[in-house]
Amino acid sequence: MANFVNLQKASRRKIYYAIVLILPALVLRLFTSLYPVVYTIYLSFFRVNPIIGAHTYAGLANFQKMSADLVVRESIMFTVFFTFVSIAFQTALGLLVALLLNKRFALRYFARTINLIPWAIPMIVVALGFRWMFDGEYGIITDLIARFTGLRFAWLVDPWGARWAIVLANVWKNTPFVAMLLLAGLQSVPLELYEAARVDGASGWHCFRYITIPFLSPIVITTVLFFTVWYLATFDIVYGMTGGGPGFSTAIMSYKIYQETFSHMNFGYASAISVALLFLVGILGTIVLFISRKFEILL
Amino acid sequence: MNLEGSRTNLVTTYVLFCVYVFITIFPFYWIFISSVTPKHKLFSIPPLYFPSYFTAENFVRMAGNIPFSAYLRNSLVFALSSSAVSVFLSFLAAYAFARIRFRGSNVLLLLFLLSIALPPITTVIPLYELYGRVGLLNKIEGMVIAMSSLITPFTIWILISFIKQVPAEIEEAAAIDGAGFLHILFRIAFPLIVPAVGTMFVINFITGWNELLYPLVFAVDARSKTLTVGLTEVALESTAYGKPWDLMSALSVVMIIPVIVLVIIFQRTIVEGLTRGAIK
């Protein structure tokens, strides 16, 4: 017992303690992730009747159906579009906001609270709130856009209008969060570095390029990676804001899977689309990881 | 830099700051205004930016439209329990990862973190079937199991970095004095990282309060449905003007207020907890 925290000797007893401590979290995690994923992959090869609970082996039938399904193709396209367009906008705008809030001025404390509030509220509230504000007749954003541009447009009735409206609502909610992370990064840069660079005659741009960016790039990479896998699983905003419509133009993959599962009771087919989503997350996650590694070396 | 230049700089800063605050606050303003505007004024073309009639009637009608108090209680129980379970299990695991080195511990931690990438929807069908078989469907307990598991990897990750910040000497000294394992864990290590545990409890509570998917899938009636599901139920109704935006706004305000209060109280520690993951 005496050498429990002694890091020199990893005694048998310490390892036993580690296992006991980690086991509850591990069991919980395996029960709700590994088991369901394996079972989902299994189900994707079956035709399932959830009412009577019967499974019939269907081979690749679900996957064949999926490859011919235009809705699924559209769904994959929109999922990827939503993920990367949102990330591009929120990162660029988040950087601007962080640089703005990093300036010394009287309201910085207030600004930090403002940054957290959109992060803290339920996505379903944001989704329905923006649906209301984008309403074709009574919507206030519709009205504002009409006042400034003369363009009165029923955004959520048009496929691309709806797609961009969803991205806009999402970027509105998450930009402050990204800004908060980048702001913390900016504040971690030692001020002496800038002073030293100034003394050596570096321009503002040089300071930004060779001091600020290298300090921020690991944070940008972590957030981009995190948001990539997170956005590929987006559900709430589509469920609340468009219900996948108009038509199926905004049926993001999680939403499509939900619909197949609980509206059409096609458990087997929904599982096949789930497998496709898992592949998408794996592939895009790896690509983003590799690109960001390369990028980090360049910076 | 001359004085003139820095003054225009400051003006630009304030102008941009006002634009940012306006964009961020505006949706809140509008949801709030919609919640206190009488129905016949709410559906105006063009919309009334600064309405002059206020009413609390929308809140009363909203609360009569859904089993409001049951949903509110479920939301609280669901968020509090999910947060408590995840923080407790994460503290145990994070302590082991931070303090005890053993073969495979890095791989195990990596697996925990990789599981963050798993889309929750891909696990829903098997859990739904299983919950149906073992009687966990329409039970808050079942929803809590799924939810606390979902937020555990992130919580472990953040807690590890907090625990590593605390020097191990105090625990070592206690061990030399003959303190038992449980004593060291709960009486010595735990008090040292109580602030971090509290921070994660607040963050996880907010995450649970906001969760839609699990309650939507696993809850069947007022025994386990939460406010997030309640909001989607109000949204299903339709009136002559479209959706009942007056009632939805009222419910939205009720759902927003608790988290805004939490954010204002715990602003500093929440920011520290959230940025911990990205910056080290």
Image (tube, helix red, strand yellow):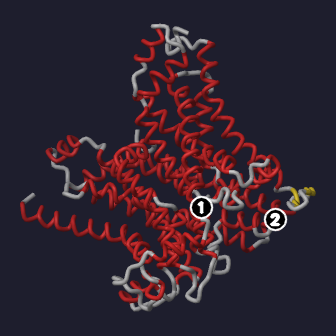
* Residue that mark 2 sits on: A266
Q: Is residue A240 above or below residue A146?
A: above
Residue type at mark 1 is: Thr
Q: Which residue is drawn at 45% across and 13% down?
A: B174
Numbered badge on residue A250: none
Is residue A164 among the parts visible in the rendering? no
Answer with the quarter of the image where residue A23 lies: top right
Residue B270 appears anywhere in the view: yes
Q: Give me the residue at 55% from left, 56% from top.
A: A228
Amino acid tagged 2: Asn
Instruction: In the displayed orientation, state which residue is furthest to the left.
Output: B3
Tell me the distance, in whole angstroms, between the alpha carbons under discs 1 and 2. 21 Å
Measured as percent of width and height from the top left, residue A116 is found at 39, 56
Q: Position of residue B27 (x, y in %)?
A: 41, 72
Q: Name the residue under label 1.
A: A234
Please name whichever residue, A177 or A66, is drawn nearer the observer in this view of the structure.
Answer: A177
- Using residue A222 as the reference point, say whether residue B110 is left or right of it: right
- Dot 1 alpha-carbon crowd within 10 angstroms: few under 14, some 14 to 19, many 20 or more: many
Is A14 left or right of B206, judged from the image as shown? Answer: right
Q: Where is residue B275 in the image (x, y as percent from the top left)?
A: 41, 45
Q: Quadrant of residue A90?
A: bottom left
Residue in view at x 35 percent, y 53 percent: B264
| Residue drawn at x 21%, y 66% as measured from the top left | B14
Work out whether B64 lies above or below B132: below
Q: Is B53 located above or below residue B79 in the figure?
A: below
Q: Which of marks 1 and 2 is nearer the N terminus?
A: 1
Picture quarter with the N terminus of chain B: bottom left
For disc 2, the chain is A
Question: Which of the two residues, A213 or A2, is positioned nearer the viewer here?
Answer: A2
